[in-house]
Amino acid sequence: MKIKLISIALILALVGCSNDKQNKEQSIPDIPVVKVSKVEVMSYSPTLSFTGTVFANREANLGAALPGKVEKILFAEGNKVRKGDLIVELADEMLTQAQVENQALRKDYERVKRLREKESISQIELDHIKAKLEASDAKTEMIRKNTRVYAPFSGTIVERMMEEGEIFFINPGLEPGYSIRSGIVRLMQLDPVKVEFEVNEKDLHLVKPGLEAEIIVDSQMGTTFNAKVTSVKPMLSTLTRTATAKIILSNPKVELKPGMFARIDISLPQQESVFVPLSSIGRLQGTGEEFIYIIEDGVAKRRVVTRLYTKGDMVAVAGVEQHQQIIIEGKAKVMDGQKVEVRR
């Protein structure tokens, strides 16, 4: 009986040891095997993309400073004009009246001047009639100028805002996106044209006059126009927090027309940055943060990164340093601070 008890005790002891060993083996976690690569430094030319609109290089609504009847418009829509060409003639009834008054005042002045030479009247009376004549001369000349409308620059008549026989008043020609000044015809300079686009404040320090730009206009079947940034407005809109930038484009065939939609790519100066494979970047769930794992002393450490530029399957990022090892395969099995087995 005693021998049986001893045998049972030995069996229980052996079974206990076996279970302890098995539990210890099960409690040791598996070390994930990962593939790593070194961070690369590469040169690249970053590009900023914008959308914009084509506008005439110069634009003017041609009219007069005084109301009047439109007698004749000498050019049709689409006609080209040269600087100084007579565009519109207005009724001259007011001019005729002013000329008659001017002639009467001139006769009075000559008569008073002769009387003054004979010292029949005082100098004050002569000065008084002289001032009236000078005012009449200025009024007559002003009315004369406002019965004729001339082209202030060479361009194209793009719109007749009034027709012959209508009475011109000083009221704005409302056309969203274009000049809202009053006028009888709208004149535009279409060669060259300008492309305007809005730059938000975070990119404003990057966009400078002189940078190379590629402009694509959809209506031109993907034709690319090359030019340079001409200017950036030195103030931002209080509504959009953007500044207007402008590019001047040669347009000898008038292929580009005001109002067309344009896509603009601005080439920034070449620079160097740390690049990592696209496959090495992960995203923290529930956040917009992206990260990669670096390896230090066999331990995976998570680093938040910011994308700067994408070049094929490589991404320029901020947040890692040159020569650091990063996990490019197996990151889904890894947690921050976990020991890993590295496979190059």
Image (cartoon, grey):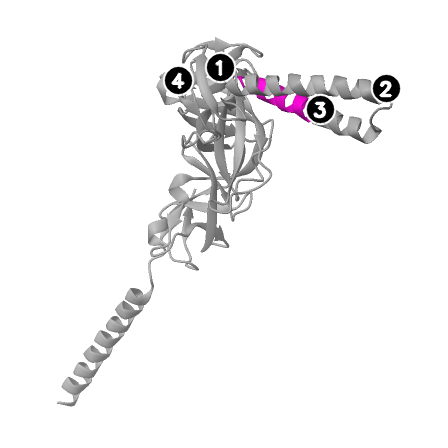
Stretch in magenta: 134-147
The three-letter amino acid code for the residue at tag 1 is Val
According to the picture, the residue beneath numbered tag 2 turns out to be: 117
The quarter of the displayed image where residue 157 is located: top left
Q: CA distance from mark 4 to mark 2?
A: 50 Å
Dot placed on the residue nearer the N-terminal end, 3 or 1: 1
Can you name the residue that lies furthest to the left here?
A: 1
According to the picture, the residue beneath numbered tag 1 turns out to be: 88
According to the picture, the residue beneath numbered tag 3 turns out to be: 134
Dot placed on the residue nearer the N-terminal end, 4 or 1: 1
Can you name the residue that lies furthest to the bottom here?
A: 2
Q: CA distance from mark 4 to mark 1?
A: 12 Å
Q: Give the side of residue 84 with respect to residue 123, left or right.
A: left
Q: CA distance from mark 2 to mark 1?
A: 46 Å
Q: Give the side of residue 109 with respect to residue 37, left or right.
A: right
Asked if labels 1 and 3 touch by Cβ distance under 8 angstroms, the answer is no
Q: Secondary structure at mark 2?
A: helix
| Image spot of residue 219 (x, y percent) | 36, 19
Q: Nearer the viewer, residue 50 or 303?
A: 50
Asked if labels 3 and 2 touch by Cβ distance under 8 angstroms, the answer is no
In this rendering, does residue 195 appear at all? Answer: yes
**Discs 3/4, front:** 3
Asked if labels 4 and 3 touch by Cβ distance under 8 angstroms, the answer is no
Residue under the image location 65 percent in, 16 percent down = 103
Question: Does the magenta run of residues contain 139?
Answer: yes
